[in-house]
Image (spheres, rainbow, N blue to C red):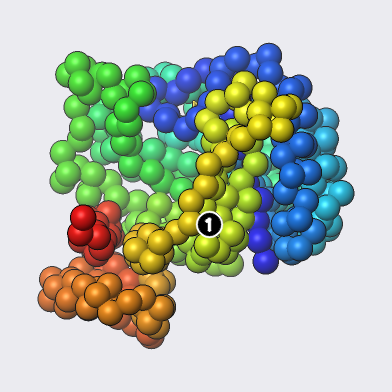
C-alpha cells in the first residue's frame, strides 16, 4: 500500500501567512505538467510495484489547473498503476475556483474528496489574510461541491489570528459544523519566516495571541466538534467516523509515498527525499535529466524522533512495542522521559499505545520536543 502526493505550486495571489512553496507566475504551467509526467516516468518502478491507494493534489493551489490539465497528469499515472484501485483521490481547491462545471469535471476524473481552504467565514479576516475569496463564495463553494457529486469534503480553518475575537471564532466553528462537511482541519496561525505576517510581527504590526486565548479557542473547537460527532483523530484534524483522511493518516503511520512536483517529499520506508523548491529549476532539471532532488537515509535517531512526532500528534498515539527496534540508549532515554511525562499526566498508555492526554493536546508540540532524542556531538 502506498500513496502519491502531487505538489501544484501555482497560486494567483500570496496569502499573508503562507510559507508553502508556490509561485504566482502562471506561465510555466505547460512545462510543469510535462516535467511532472517525466517525473512520473522516473518513478515507474515504484508505481508498478506498489498498490497505490491514495492520491493527493496539494499546493499551492491545485484548482489553478483545469480539468483537462489534471486529466493529463492522472492519465499519465494510470499508465503505471490502475486508478481504479485508488480509494481516495483528493484535490485541494480554493473556493473561488469552484463552479458546477469544474466540480462535475473533476468528479468524472475520479476525484472523490475535496479539501477546501476556507480559513474563515468573515470577510474582514479573509481580507487581512489576503485570501482571494470572500465569505459568501466560501459558503457557496461548499454547496456547489455537494450538489455536484462531492460527498467527502474537508474544510480548513485558521485560529489564533491576532485580530479575531473569540465570538468570531465561535461563529466560524458553528458555521463549519452547519456546513455539514465530513472533515475539518483547524490550524493555529504561525509566523513563518519569509511570510508577510512574519515581517509584520518583527515590525510590531501584529502580535501573537496570548497562550490563554489560543487554549480557549482550541478547547472550544474540540468541545463543539466532538458534540457534533467528529472524532479528533489528529491534533489539527477532525472527521466524522470512518471519514478520516486516508492519505494523511498514512503519513502518520509511516506508509510509503512518493511526492511529485517542486518541493514535494517522498518516503520509501528508509529513505526520505525532497524535490527542489523552485519550479523553473525543477522543469529544467527534468528536461536535462539532471538532479532535481536530494535524499537521505533515516538514522536510528531520526526514526525514533519521527515515531514520536507523528505518533503523538494522533489521538491513538504510537504502539509501545515499536520502541523495541531501537538501541538501548534510546530506549532508556524514552523510558525516563515517559516516567516524567506520566508523572505530569501529559501522556497516558492505553491498550499498548502511548498518546497525549486529552486535556494536554494543546501542548502536544512541547511534549513531543521533550521526548526528542538528541545525539551527543
Ligand atoms: S495558503 Fe494556499 S492559496 Fe494561499 S498562498 Fe498559500 S498555497 Fe497559495
- In percent of width and height, residue 84 lies at 83, 58
Task: Label 1: state its secondary structure.
Answer: strand
Res 342 visible: no
Left or right? Give the position of 70 relative to 257: right
- In percent of width and height, residue 192 lies at 33, 31
Who is closer to the viewer here, 273 or 321? 273
Q: How many marks?
A: 1
- In percent of width and height, residue 239 lies at 51, 59
- In percent of width and height, residue 42 lies at 74, 44
The answer to whether 93 is drawn above or below residue 302 in the figure is: above
The answer to whether 261 is drawn above or below residue 343 in the figure is: above
Q: Which residue is mark 1?
A: 271
- Binning the other alpha carbons within 10 Å of mark 1 as few (below 14), some (14 to 19) or many (20 upward) gives few
Q: Quadrant of the N terminus?
A: bottom right
Image point (25%, 29%), residue name: 162
Image point (24%, 60%), residue name: 375
Amino acid at each position: 500500500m502506498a500513496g502519491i502526493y502531487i505538489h501544484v505550486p501555482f497560486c494567483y495571489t500570496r496569502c499573508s501567512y503562507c510559507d508553502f512553496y508556490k509561485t504566482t507566475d502562471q506561465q510555466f504551467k505547460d512545462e510543469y505538467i510535462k516535467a511532472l509526467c517525466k517525473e512520473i516516468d522516473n518513478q515507474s518502478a515504484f508505481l508498478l510495484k506498489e498498490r497505490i491507494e491514495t492520491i493527493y493534489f496539494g499546493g499551492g493551489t491545485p484548482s489553478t489547473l483545469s480539468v483537462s490539465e489534471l486529466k493529463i497528469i492522472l492519465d499519465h499515472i494510470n499508465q503505471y498503476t490502475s486508478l481504479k484501485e485508488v480509494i481516495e483521490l483528493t484535490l485541494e481547491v480554493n473556493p473561488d475556483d469552484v463552479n458546477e462545471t469544474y466540480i462535475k469535471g473533476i468528479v468524472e476524473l475520479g476525484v472523490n474528496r475535496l479539501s477546501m481552504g476556507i480559513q474563515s467565514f468573515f470577510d474582514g479576516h479573509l481580507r487581512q489574510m489576503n485570501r482571494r475569496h470572500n465569505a459568501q463564495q466560501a459558503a457557496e463553494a461548499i454547496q456547489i461541491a455537494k450538489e455536484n457529486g462531492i460527498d467527502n469534503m474537508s474544510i480548513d480553518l485558521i485560529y489564533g489570528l491576532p485580530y479575531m475575537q473569540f465570538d468570531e471564532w465561535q461563529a466560524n466553528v458553528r458555521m463549519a459544523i452547519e456546513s455539514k462537511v465530513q472533515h475539518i482541519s483547524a490550524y493555529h496561525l504561525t509566523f513563518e519566516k519569509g511570510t508577510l505576517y512574519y515581517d509584520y510581527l518583527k515590525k510590531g504590526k501584529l502580535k501573537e495571541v496570548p497562550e490563554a486565548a489560543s487554549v480557549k479557542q482550541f478547547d472550544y473547537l474540540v468541545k463543539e466538534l466532538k458534540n457534533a460527532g467528529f472524532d479528533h483523530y489528529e491534533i489539527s484534524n477532525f472527521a466524522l467516523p470512518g471519514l478520516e483522511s486516508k492519505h494523511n493518516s498514512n503519513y502518520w503511520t509511516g506508509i510509503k509515498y512518493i511526492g511529485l512536483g517542486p518541493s514535494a517529499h517522498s518516503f520509501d520506508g528508509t529513505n526520505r527525499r525532497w524535490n527542489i523548491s523552485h519550479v523553473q529549476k525543477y522543469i529544467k532539471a527534468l528536461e536535462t535529466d539532471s538532479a532535481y532532488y536530494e535524499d537521505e537515509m533515516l538514522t536510528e535517531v531520526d526514526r525514533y524522533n519521527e515515531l514520536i512526532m507523528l505518533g503523538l500528534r494522533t489521538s491513538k498515539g504510537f504502539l509501545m512495542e515499536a520502541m523495541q527496534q531501537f538501541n538501548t540508549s534510546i530506549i532508556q532515554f524514552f523510558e525516563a522521559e515517559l516516567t516524567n511525562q506520566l508523572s505530569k499526566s501529559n501522556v497516558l498508555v492505553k491498550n499498548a499505545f502511548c498518546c497525549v492526554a486529552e486535556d494536554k493536546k494543546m501542548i502536544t508540540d512541547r511534549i513531543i520536543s521533550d521526548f526528542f532524542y538528541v545525539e551527543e556531538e
